[in-house]
Image (cartoon, grey):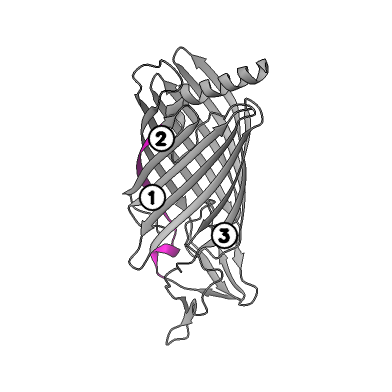
């Protein structure tokens, strides 16, 4: 019983005291407490000219130790076809093959299973400050056609990824820098022999979080309110579409290599130290993403269970 109480107090202290590190759109170098279990429900939405697009993810997290955690996630959305449309590849008057632009369906499909880890290898604590660094990695199984050049391990592509996270906390301000890479695997339809081959991608983010309330802690039941400014970017290569031996030519920007940076402001509420609610939106800052429309709206709800 004594051990349980000490573990719970340690977990609550960790979650409450460093609340401004719980970035809504990126992960910190911190690890959830040992033997703590977390569930995060993630939701994204935007509108197109023809319909309303939403994406949903459920993430499950477990602290194996004070330095190592595991996570698993499943996703669903109405972003994808189950297989490519019959008219996906067409021919012009010169018999040159090209990809026909098609709007995605409005039916929901199961997208992916994502398994990952985070390992904190550096921890430097000071008075009202600390600096932490962590490695992360994940592997994703997804089997639906993703016909844009930009790759993502949040439901779009099968592949592996990993990178480095550095997080600095100074009083009420948290700053985190993430750099990573994505190695996507190709998608092939057996019946049509159409294959989609993706290039590697590189993601990066710079996040700022500030605790605006409470002004002074009196107990861990106080609601925390945090404001965030996050800058998320990605660089990626061309999508190559092949039909047997023939390379399909397209001039659409969604198939070309690119890069962009988004600005994502957010507000976060942490209630009684273990319930977290994030509300954020995304706007293009430098160029833009072609796998979504703007503005993008996001709501996350996360709950921690302590052993």
Residue 249 percent across, percent down from the top left: 47, 73
Q: Give the residue drawn at x 40%, y 35%.
A: 207
Quarter of the image with the N terminus is: top right
Residue 264 percent across, percent down from the top left: 36, 42
> In the orientation shown, which residue stands out farthest toward the bottom?
93
**296 horizontally vs 70: left or right:** left
Pointer 3 local density, CA inside 10 Å: few below 14, some 14–19, many at least 20? some
Q: Badge 2 is on which residue?
A: 207
**Considering only order in the chain, which callout, 3 or 2, is on the residue closer to the N terminus?**
3
Q: Badge 3 is on which residue?
A: 110
Q: Is residue 302 above or below residue 193?
A: above
Instruction: Give SS at disc 1.
Output: strand
Residue bounds of the magenta highlight: 251-269
Q: Give the residue drawn at x 40%, y 47%.
A: 298
Select label 3 or label 1 by which is in front: 3
Rounded to the nearest angstrom, the CA distance separating label 3 from label 1 is 28 Å
Reply yes or no: does residue 267 show up in magenta: yes
Residue 152 percent across, percent down from the top left: 51, 53
């Amino acid at each position: 019983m004594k051990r349980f109480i000490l573990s719970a107090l340690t977990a609550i202290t960790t979650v409450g005291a460093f609340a401004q590190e719980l970035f809504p759109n990126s992960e910190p170098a911190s690890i959830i407490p040992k033997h703590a279990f977390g569930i995060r429900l993630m939701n994204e939405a935007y509108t197109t000219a023809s319909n309303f697009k939403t994406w949903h993810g459920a993430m499950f997290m477990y602290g194996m130790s004070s330095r190592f955690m595991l996570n698993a996630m499943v996703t669903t959305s109405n972003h994808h076809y189950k297989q490519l449309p019959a008219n996906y590849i067409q021919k012009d008057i010169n018999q040159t093959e090209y990809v026909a632009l098609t709007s995605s369906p409005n039916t929901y499909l199961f997208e992916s299973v994502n398994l990952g880890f985070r390992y904190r290898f550096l921890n430097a604590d000071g008075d009202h400050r600390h600096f932490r660094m962590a490695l992360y990695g994940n592997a994703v199984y997804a089997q639906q056609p993703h016909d844009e050049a930009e790759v993502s391990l949040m439901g779009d592509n099968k592949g592996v990824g990993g990178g480095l996270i550095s997080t600095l906390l100074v009083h009420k301000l948290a700053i985190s820098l993430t750099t990573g890479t994505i190695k996507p695997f190709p998608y092939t339809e057996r019946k049509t022999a159409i294959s989609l081959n993706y290039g590697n991608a590189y993601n990066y983010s710079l996040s700022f979080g500030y605790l605006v309330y409470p002004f002074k802690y009196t107990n861990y039941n106080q609601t925390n309110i945090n404001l965030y400014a996050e800058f998320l970017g990605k660089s990626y290569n061309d999508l190559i579409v092949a039909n047997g031996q023939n390379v399909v030519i397209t001039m659409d920007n969604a198939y070309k290599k690119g890069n962009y940076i988004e600005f994502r402001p957010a507000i976060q509420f942490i209630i009684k130290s273990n319930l977290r609610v994030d509300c954020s939106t995304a706007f293009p800052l430098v160029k833009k993403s072609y796998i979504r429309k703007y503005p993008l709206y996001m709501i996350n709800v996360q709950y921690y269970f302590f052993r």
